[in-house]
Amino acid sequence: MAVDEGKSKIELDRLRQIYYIRNQQTRGLEEFVALEEFSLSIREGTFVAIVGPSGCGKSTLLDIIAGLTRSKGGGSIQIDGRQVTGPALDRGFIMQGYALFPWRTVQRNIEYGLEVKGVSRKERGEIARKFIKLVELEGFEDRYPNELSGGMRQRVAIARALAYDPEVLLMDEPFAAVDAQTRETMQDELLKIQSKTNKTVIFVTHSIEEAVLLADRVVVMTPRPGRIKQIVDVTLPRPRTNADMRASADYDVIVRRIWELLHDAEIPGAVDGAATGGDIADEIVPSTIL
Amino acid sequence: MTKKEKKEIIIDPTQKQNPVIAALKRIFMASFAIVVFLIIWEVAARLELVSVPAFFPPVTKIAAALADEAVKGYLWKNILISLRRSLLGFGLGLLVAIPLGLAIGWFKLFGDLVNPLLQVFRNLPTLALLPVFVMFFGIGELSKVMVILWGVLWYTLLNTISGVRSVDPQLIKAARSMGTGSLRLFGTVVLPAALPFIFTGMRISATVSILILIAAEMMGANRGLGYAMFFYQGNFLIPKMFGYIVVMAIIGTALSFVLEHIEKRSFRWRDETGST
Ligand SMILES: Nc1ncnc2c1ncn2[C@@H]1O[C@H](COP(=O)(O)OP(=O)(O)O)[C@@H](O)[C@H]1O
Ligand SMILES: [Mg+2]
C-alpha cells in the first residue's frame, strides 16, 4: 500500500487564502477567507482526493500548489523539502476545462511542456508519440482539439501533463465534463497510468464515488472557510477498477462514511467539532443520492 | 437549363453534381443580382428615364469608355500607381498597427493610458484630415501614402487589441502552470490566439486601402484611379468617370474575396464543431 511507504513528497503547512471582495452596500473591501489552516503531508506515490462542497476552496488550493496563485494569508508549500515559489515542470496541472491550445494539433499540444523544458524536436516527437499511445489516441496526432470529443480532449490534457514527466499531478475535476461512460473509462485508465508511473496525485472531485475509487486518502473539506474536516484512508486493495468497486461492500461503507461527513456540515457543530457550518445544503450534491 | 438543374435537385438531393455544372451554378448565383442591376441600368439609360441623361450613360457606353482607356494604356498606369500607393499605405499601416495593438492589448496600463487618445483619433473622419496631411507632408506621394496609412490603421489596430484581450485566461493559466515565461507565453499563446482577429482586421484594412484612394488622390495627384475619376468628372467625360468607379469596385471586391478565402483556409483550428 502506497499509504504507508515512501518519503514525504508534499508538505502543505497552514495554507490560508484571503480574497478581497467588494461589499455591494458599503462599497468597501471585505476579507473573504477561502482557505484556512490547510495542512497536509503527502507521501510519494500517494493518490489524494479532495472532496467538498463547491466554493470551499478546492480550486484555490490547487492553484496555490501549482504556484499560479500566491497564498495571501500565509502558510508554505514544500515539495521534496524545497519551498514552492512559482509554477514549474515538477508539477502537472490538469484543469477542468481541458485548456488545450486550439491552434495546436494533439501532438503539438502534448509537446508544449517539452518545448518549455528545452527538449529537442526529435525527442519531443518520440515522447509525444509514447504518450499518445498511452492515452490511446493513435491516429489522432494531427487533429485539432475542435475535431475531438470531450473524452478525447481530456485524454490529450492528461497526456500533455504527463509528457514532461512531472512528479506531482494536480487534477481539478478533470472528468466532470465528460459523460458517465467515458468517465468510467477515464477513471480506469487513470488508475492504470498511476500504478505504472507512481506519480503523486492530488485530485479534486465532486463525486464521492470517484474519490473512493481512485484515492488512497480522501480529504473531506468544510465550506467557508475551506478547512480539512477529516481525512479518510481508503484501504481498498489495488489494482482497482470500476467493476471491482461495484461488487465491493467495503467500498460502499467508505462512500457512505464520506457522504455522512459532508452532510454533517449542514448542522453547525454537530458530530464533528471542526465543522463550521453554514448554509451549504443546496450546494452539496453527492452523486450517491442522484 | 437552370430549370432542369432545379428539377434534378428536387428529385435526388443527395446525387453528386457535375463539378462544371456546380461551378456554373455558383457563378450564376453570384452574378445574378449584378447582371439584373446592369440590365436595368442599361435600359433606364437608353430610355433616358433620368433627368440629366448626360450624367447617366448606359453600361455599354461605360464599358466602351473603359476599353478606350485600356487601349490607350492609361487604365493600367492608373491601376499600377494606385495599387502601389494602397499597398504601401497598407503595409506601413500594418507595421504600425500590429505591434502597437499587441502592446496596447498586452500591457494593460499602457492600453488604459493610450485608449482615450485612440478613441478621439479614430473618430476623426479621414476627409477632414486631408488639409492637415497636406500641411505636414505636402502634396507628393508621401501624403497620399500617409492618408491611406491613417485610414487603414484603425481596423487592424482595434482588431489586434481585442484579439489580445480576448485570449482565454484558462490557456494562459495552462501555459503558466508549465513554467512558461512571459516571452514564450506571448509567442505561443497570446499571439496565436490573437492571430485570427489580426487577420480579420488586415482583411478589412486591405479593402479600405482601396476605398480610401479617392480621398488620397484628391490631394494634387496627376495619376491614379481616384485622380482619373475626378479628372473625367471635371471634364464631363462621365462614361470614363463611371468606368474608373467600376474598376475600383472590381479591385476592392476581388481583394476582399481573395483575403476572405485565405482567412477561411488558414484557421482550420477555429472551425467550431462543438468546441468550447
Ligand atoms: N479571484 C477570486 N476573487 C475572489 N474570490 C474568489 C476568487 N477565486 C475564488 N474565490 C472564492 O473563493 C471560494 C473558493 O473558490 P474555489 O477555490 O474556486 O472553490 P471550489 O473549487 O472548491 O469550488 C469561492 O467562494 C469563490 O467565490
Ligand atoms: Mg473548483
Image (spheres, coloured by chain):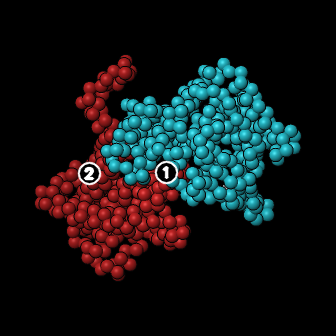
Chain colours: A cyan, B red
Q: Is residue B10 visible?
A: yes
| Nearer-the-camera pick, A123 or A54 | A123
Residue at 82% across / 44% down in the picture?
A: A275
Residue where numbered disc 1 is placed:
A89
Residue at 44% across / 42% down in the picture?
A: A163
In x, y percent, where is residue B73? 13, 60
Label 2 residue near ligand 1, CB within 8 Å? no
| Nearer-the-camera pick, B42 or B159 | B159
Residue A187's disc is none
A176 displayed left or right of B167: right
In x, y percent, where is residue B262? 32, 47
Q: Label 1 crowding class (10 Å Cα cut-off): few <14, some 14-19, many 20+?
A: many
Residue at 29% across / 37% down in the picture?
A: B27
- Say which element carries label 2: loop
A220 displayed left or right of B140: right
Q: CA distance from mark 1 to mark 2?
A: 72 Å
Label 1 residue near ligand 2, CB within 8 Å? no
Amino acid type, mark 2: Pro
- Say which element carries label 1: loop
Residue where numbered disc 2 is placed:
B58
Amino acid type, mark 1: Leu
